[in-house]
Image (tube, rainbow, N blue to C red):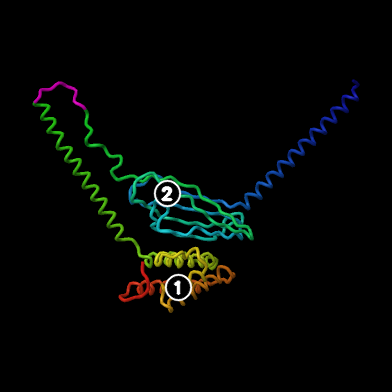
Amino acid sequence: MSARSSFSLCSVFRVQAGVACLVAVLLSTSSVSAQNTSAGTKTRVDISASKSNVQVAEPFAVELTVVAPKGTQVSLPPVAAKLGEFDVVDHHDIADVPVADGRRSWTRRLTLESIVTGKWEVPVMDIQTRTGSTAQIVRSEPIPIHVASVLEGRADPSKFRDIHSVVDLPVVLQAERSTAWMWWVGGTLGGLTLATVALALVTRRKHWLTPADWANQQLDALKASLVRASDAEAATSHLSSILRDYLQMQFEIAAPTQTTSELFNTIKHRALLSPNHRQRFQELFEATDLAKFAGLHMTLAELNADIERARELIDATAAEIMSPGSNVEAN
């Protein structure tokens, strides 16, 4: 083969190699761009627990976070008195907060506890999302939690080290008598411990918050969080959630999952509130709905005024339920 032919072939090979490299780079860039676009439009669900091992009646925290593209409507599941095998002691939602990359986040913080020992799970939670005309369900992962007795892990007083030396019979009888008192002490201590735990549980239950007390605490926290005018949008949605959760706890109705119209039809049909209080509650819900769905922006002063109206209504309805001769249903 001539030198000229060798040079021509080498040139062709170099050109082909360069083209192949260029195609590979372009394909790699295209793949990365598609990945980033997908990541920006994907809804993510994160869930975590503050502890994986707790004792009976020991509270622990669970945090559920949903991150979705801007414009997505996210509906967290309604909060009930129990979540799986756990009692729901408290909960707090923070809705539609802006995060990085133009996305929004919804966060639910739950305080849970159990009075039943065992290996349980914080169950899967279904979250409904809607973007335009597309709706889908996203799910959280279950979290294993071990609930232990306060006696679990303690040394067994009935297990002693063996005596290997040879002794006379009287000494053996004395040893048997000496171990008998340890059985009595162990049994007595165990009984006293169980009685103390039972008393603590009963005392704890007596100090549970009423629905009105819980709602007032939530309103105090909401009012304290209002610093800037930009906080009003998320706070308006939170105010509506507090009122719905209060009505759910007070009357055992599915307030968080109902529309405002459905909710007040239920309240009217079951005569859960007096006509005056029902009308005032409905006006408050309509104001928050206008801000939430119609884009009506509320000032901090208007939102603070609505918080105080809500507090007054909650106190008034709680007093109405507890008053003698009241026809309003109480739970």
User: Outermost residue toward the left?
Assistant: 170
Q: Element type at marker 2? A: loop
- The kind of residue on which mark 2 rests is Ser
Taking the image as shown, residue 4 lies to the left or right of residue 19, namely: right
Q: Is residue 218 visible?
A: no
Position of residue 121 relative to residue 106, above or below, is above
Q: Which secondary structure dominates the residues rendered in magenta?
A: loop
**10 Å crowding of disc 1: few (<14), some (14-19), many (20+):** few
Q: Element type at marker 1? A: helix
Q: Is residue 164 magenta?
A: yes
Q: Is residue 23 visible?
A: yes
Q: Which residue is mark 2?
A: 50
In-front residue for pair 83/325: 325
Query: Residue 197 at what x, y percent from top left?
Result: 26, 50
Disc nearer the start of the sequence (1/2): 2
Which range of residues does the magenta coloring cover?
162-169
Q: Which residue is mark 1?
A: 269
Query: Residue 327 at what x, y percent from top left?
Result: 36, 75
Position of residue 192 relative to residue 13, above or below, is below
The CA span between labels 1 and 2 is: 42 Å
Taking the image as shown, residue 233 lies to the left or right of residue 133, namely: left
Query: Residue 202 at what x, y percent from top left?
Result: 27, 56
Q: How many marks?
A: 2
Instruction: Kindly indicate the quadrant of the structure image that contains residue 80.
Output: bottom left
Which residue does the image show at 54% across and 68% down from the upper left? 229
For discs 1 and 2, the disc positioned in front in the rendered view:
1
**10 Å crowding of disc 2: few (<14), some (14-19), many (20+):** few
Query: Residue 156 at what x, y percent from top left?
Result: 25, 37
Which residue does the image show at 18% across and 38% down from the upper left? 183
Q: Quadrant of the N terminus?
A: top right
Which residue does the image show at 38% across and 57% down from the upper left? 89
Which residue does the image show at 49% across and 58% down from the upper left? 77
